[in-house]
Image: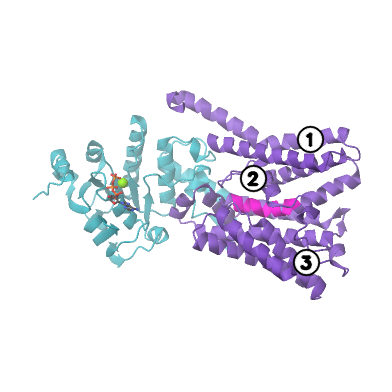
Chain colours: A purple, B cyan
Amino acid sequence: MLGRLTQGELKIAGRRREQLLFLMDNGIYVVTVLLFIVFVFLAPYFFTPRNLVNILISASLAGIVTAGYTVAILAGQIDTSTQGVLAVATVTTALLFEELGFSLPMTVIFALLAGIAAGLFNGVIVVNGKIVAFVATLATQGVMLAIALFLSGGQTITIAREGLQEAVFIRVFGIPSSVWIMFFCYIVGYVLLTQTKLGAHIYATGADYRASLLSGVPVDRVIRIALVISALTAALTAVLVTARAKQSAMFGLAIAGSVDFVTALTAVLLGGFSLFGGVGRIERNLVAVLFLTILGNGLQLMNVPTGIILIVRGFALVLAVILSVLRARMT
Amino acid sequence: MASDEVILETIDLDKSFGAVHAVRTVSWKVYAGSVNALVGDNGAGKSTLIKLISGALQPNGGGFRVRGQETRIGGPAGAFGLGIAAVYQDLALVENRDVVMNMFLGSELTRGPGQIFLDHKGMLRQAHQVLDDIHARIPNVREMVRNLSGGQRQAVAVGRALIRGGEIIIMDEPTAALGVEQTQEVLQLIDTLRSQGKTIILISHNIQQVFEIADFISVMFHGELLGTRPREKATEAEVVAMIMGKRSP
Ligand SMILES: Nc1ncnc2c1ncn2[C@@H]1O[C@H](COP(=O)(O)OP(=O)(O)OP(=O)(O)O)[C@@H](O)[C@H]1O
Ligand SMILES: [Mg+2]
């Protein structure tokens, strides 16, 4: 069809296309604000300080894991091992803190190291094994889940020792630390992606691997780093989830509410990212996470049955996928 | 500015892809400050030869002499180090990045501790300057490359080569996909580069165009280099015959 347009018309089409893209990319801001306003009127207790803080806490857990996930997506790597990393890191946290009596800082450091190790493992399979991340990380996730199962003996480890939850959820200016950590992650992510050389390489590698390679971008190293960042934020989330639940949350990811691969994926797609990499802005992602959290929270307060909420969230993913495909066709 | 000073030389360069012998013991001289055209039929081995020179491929045999020094070209980065920069047939531009980021891709200007931060201002300034130098018409350097015309893309790719410190600029069929006006723009660009003392390696299928712009014309046939002629001593008929495999005396 485009072939039949003359060159002049193509330019107009190009401008319209850019406008439409702008709308698709930034619509998430408008939709989120609208949703918020709707719930203020429809959902009882929604607009109370207590509930708003609750929303922020839930959003923080999903938000942190999504921040790293975004970096991987931008580098063109769909990292499906999030659940696996969460499992390894939650078990590590609970084991070290509860059963081996590690200090809080050491526990956190080792849980994060477990995340880094998982990310490096993903990197080896993707880069050295030359296997598409989507498939490779599905496989490594199986290994990680098995390791977590082995370490925990298949049991949920309950944390009786004081200090973990209290420390991790200290309130600063009335807002729990996990929320501050989330904002910190997004600020670091924003600076990394827009202001650093590594960020430019992450975008370029995701947008066009071959062109980047020919231009001298160290593409393989970039992919490794992106996968480590993704796993690292998953591990950080695991520490917070474990602290919040006071137990290893391996089989109880439901405890964490919305911390999972699907939410991260939905948020990333709603945020206007391309599944093929190289396109998207991390700040939109934060908004998309808030959108999904507000949606779940508001519906819950309106006493909508959980099953229906899950269906709505499912549709949100379907919509996000459609948007993403439309976007990909347009560019 | 055409000279007979040899800036780059391949020595018995050889490359096979399995059973396909794409480049056969090619010894080729590239002249400084000149437009060195490389012509030949489809599959003659032109792209393969220049990929060996730009470090995108590694030879199975033979070597290089650059500015009189024997050397190997380990990869694209090694080639940049020697002042060799290729503008590939598909330009190797990243569609979803803007002009500036494309021009600096892989050689970003940096600042701050550990040189990890991008020097956005510096890159913007230098991008404008380089594009001005080659008289490129690109109104907005923050435009995504996907919205540029073919001629503009060519300018961006050449700009990138110059930013890399490219002294020897390789262009693989730069006008193949372009209309009349944009082709003229690219030829002008090549002329500008030559007048600034750059060495250009130009692959083209358009014999007329080659005679219009080249100083030296080299012909490949079935992986072999059949010969090099200064333009003023060559005739179109002779070159066409060579392209079809007729060895000249
Ligand atoms: N990566 C590769 N793997 C296998 N064979 C290849 C590869 N690249 C090139 N060839 C083969 O090597 C030969 C020379 O190809 P090359 O691309 O160098 O030709 P060319 O002169 O640039 O042709 P054209 O004018 O069509 O661009 C061809 O037979 C081609 O099929
Ligand atoms: Mg070719």
The answer to whether marks 1 and 2 mark residues whose Cβ atoms lie closer than 8 Å is: no
Q: Earlier in the sequence, mark 1 or mark 2?
A: 1
Specify the quadrant of the image occupied by residue A154. bottom right
Residue type, numbered disc 3? Gln
Q: Is residue A71 magenta-colored?
A: yes
State the extent of the magenta-drawn residues as a range. A62-73
**Residue bearing mark 2:** A281
User: Which chain letter matches label 2?
Assistant: A
Q: Which mark is residue A35?
A: 1
Q: Is residue B244 left or right of residue A272?
A: left
- Nearer to us: label 1 or label 2: 1
Q: What distance separates the C-alpha of mark 2 from that of mark 3?
A: 40 Å
Instruction: State if disc 3 and disc 1 touch (CB < 8 Å).
Output: no
Residue at 88% over, 45% down: A51
Mark 1 sits near ligand 1, with its Cβ under 8 Å away = no
Q: Earlier in the sequence, mark 2 or mark 3?
A: 3
